[in-house]
Image: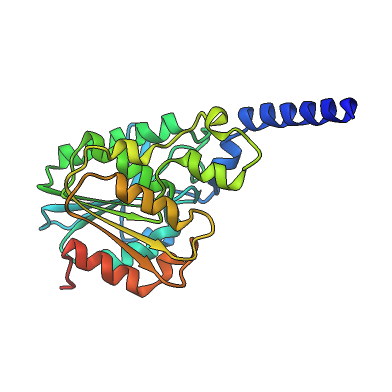
Amino acid sequence: MIKSVLIGLATLFILFIYMFLNQNNYIYFPDNQDFDNCPGFADSERVRVNDTRMYYLKDEYADTAVVYYHGNAGSACGRSFIKDTLKDRGVSLLFVEYAGYSNDTRRPSRKLILKDVENVINFIDRAGYERKFLMGTSLGTAVVAYHQSIQKPDKVVLLAPFDKLSEVGKIHYPFLPVSLLLREEYDTAGWLKDHTGEILIVHGALDEIVPLELAMRLYEAIPSDNKNLITVEGASHNDLLLRPEVWETVTSFLGLKER
């Protein structure tokens, strides 16, 4: 009995060390898509600010920029269908690619992704947009939260958000002390603790990756009086962005009308 317990504890300890050292492999899932060869963004400029890359669709007459931060898998290129929904609505669009994604040789990390945000902010400041809308999905919602903690936007849209990444980890790895293990923490609620502006949260009722409960916790933690949580019945994590009603809600919230 004692021997079995010791073996079990040793196995858990080895697993703990392995997960601690390799956690980036369980958080970030980039693909090797070529940033400079994305057919979906053929109509957009490829922008590089220091080491940060963006697809930039500029509207010469727009005083508003919409910045989009994608989730933890794939690439910004794979979200070009969102650009097709938002373009020709009187705004300029920036789709941010993360460090370590889309044939970037670096390994993705929280440090590098937050640095991407700071480079994006510098770009927007130099461009001189009067209004700024921030939008993100899943992991990108935490990146949005960090962005707004530095540069206050006019409106924020969070699609399938969580309050803290460690809370997501606890659901998927209930046998591990995730709060102690996780170095790559993304504290969405913490970054939004002073947010008082307009904010929209949209979440799938059947989200199996980031359960609705985590979005509800985030909603309650945000102090803004101008917040709204929309639940999309029947939607899961990976099909939320494919729902037409989601984009009807988002464009209405942002006040974007087709020309």
Q: Quadrant of the N terminus?
A: top right
| Residue 95 can be seen, yes or no | no
* Residue 23 percent coordinates (x, y): 59, 34
Residue drawn 36% across and 31% down? 115
Q: Quadrant of residue 253?
A: bottom left
* Residue 206 percent coordinates (x, y): 49, 65
Q: Quadrant of the C terminus?
A: bottom left
Pick the residue in front: 110 or 76.
Answer: 110
Residue drawn 50% across and 62% down? 238
Q: How is the image coloured?
A: rainbow
Pick the residue in front: 166 or 3.
Answer: 3
Residue drawn 9% across and 47% down? 130
Judge from the rendering whether residue 150 lies leftward or rightward of residue 113; answer left or right: left
| Residue 128 can be seen, yes or no | yes
Judge from the rendering whether residue 253 lies leftward or rightward of residue 207; answer left or right: left
Which residue is outermost to the front?
A: 1
* Residue 57 percent coordinates (x, y): 26, 56
* Residue 225 percent coordinates (x, y): 17, 51
In the rendered image, the vertical position of residue 76 relative to residue 9, given as above or below = below
Instruction: Report how many numbered discs are placed on residues in the image.
Output: 0
Judge from the rendering whether residue 78 lies leftward or rightward of residue 53; answer left or right: right
Residue drawn 49% across and 32% down? 184
Q: Quadrant of residue 10?
A: top right
Pick the residue in front: 133 or 95.
Answer: 133
